[in-house]
Image (cartoon, rainbow, N blue to C red):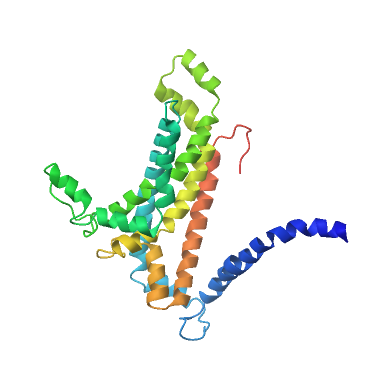
Amino acid sequence: MAKKLRKNKGLFFILPWIIGLLWFQLYPFVKSFYYSFTNYSMLNDAKFVGLTNYIRLFTTDMEFGPSLRITAIYALIVVPCKLAFALMIAMLLNMKIKGIGLFRTLYYLPSILGGSVAIAVVWKILFMRDGAINGLLAKIGLSSVDWIGSPNTALGTICVLSVWQFGSSMVLFLAALKQVPQSLYEAAIIDGSNKVQRFFSITLPMITPILFFNLIMQMINALQEFTSAFIITGGGPMKSTYVLGMKLYTDAFKYYKMGYASALSWIMFVIIICLSLLVFRSSTAWVYYEDGGEF
């Protein structure tokens, strides 16, 4: 009996996690799939309508196409810029200088704070018509810009906030840079290569596994963007920042079309899965593993 209890001790310790997984993740996941085939609206019982919600999304919904396009533009801007900045800062923080630990902490802070509602509110205040950013422009003799009130600049303002949150990717890049064997750089220096050549022939290939991981994670996060668009612009102006996350929220909690919103969430899920699979398939051509392994 005691031996059996010892064997089940591990299961007992992870039981809260298992319950949380089943009840708060798996159950809603399956339920949303069922609701996507119904007209459930939280005000009445769910009635099965088949593929009606999906057909409506691709045929009569005038917001889905533009919202998908805005989300794609947002992801195409944010993901490469965030990875580039994260790698650049990681390389700077990989240098051996005094007080480097403090600098690493300061550069990581935006990732801890950047996704919060409070920071989004602060960002909105900074980029208002009479905000601090326009105040700085006025001091150097430049005219103010309606950062969040113009369709031409609103999406870019949100993108800058997301790029500013590069700390998590930076930490991973920094860890990868520290694992690159110094002997490779020494051999390259002896061969007469310059810094640019060493970066593209040694540094970049050696950190491609981390680059691959960061690319997948940041792409998924970008395609699910919601907080900054909701807090800073509310999807406007003229729905220029109306990303898919905003549309899903509006359909579900403003119009109470939970079944329709569930169908949209599953379309988002399929898009993310397909893009992730494409990146995984392409990784065999550009991701280098020191042990020769691959996914």
Q: Position of residue 89 (x, y in %)?
A: 40, 36
Q: Nearer the viewer, residue 134 or 236?
A: 134
264 relative to 291 in the view: left or right: left
Residue furthest toward the bottom?
A: 44
Q: Position of residue 96 (x, y in %)?
A: 45, 25
174 relative to 78 in the view: left or right: right
Residue furthest toward the left?
A: 141
Q: Residue at point 56% right, 75% down?
A: 34
Considering only vertical position in the picture, is 281 above or below 14? above
Q: Residue at point 36% right, 62% down?
A: 243
Q: Can you see residue 207?
A: no
Q: How many marks?
A: 0
Q: Nearer the viewer, residue 123 or 162?
A: 123
Q: Can you see residue 294?
A: yes
Residue furthest toward the right?
A: 1
- Classify the position of the C terminus by image quarter: top right
Q: Nearer the viewer, residue 119 or 255?
A: 119
Considering only vertical position in the picture, is 21 above or below 162? below
- Classify the position of the N terminus by image quarter: bottom right
20 relative to 175 in the view: left or right: right
Considering only vertical position in the picture, is 227 above or below 160? below
Q: Residue at point 40% right, 57% down?
A: 116
Q: Position of residue 189 (x, y in %)?
A: 47, 16
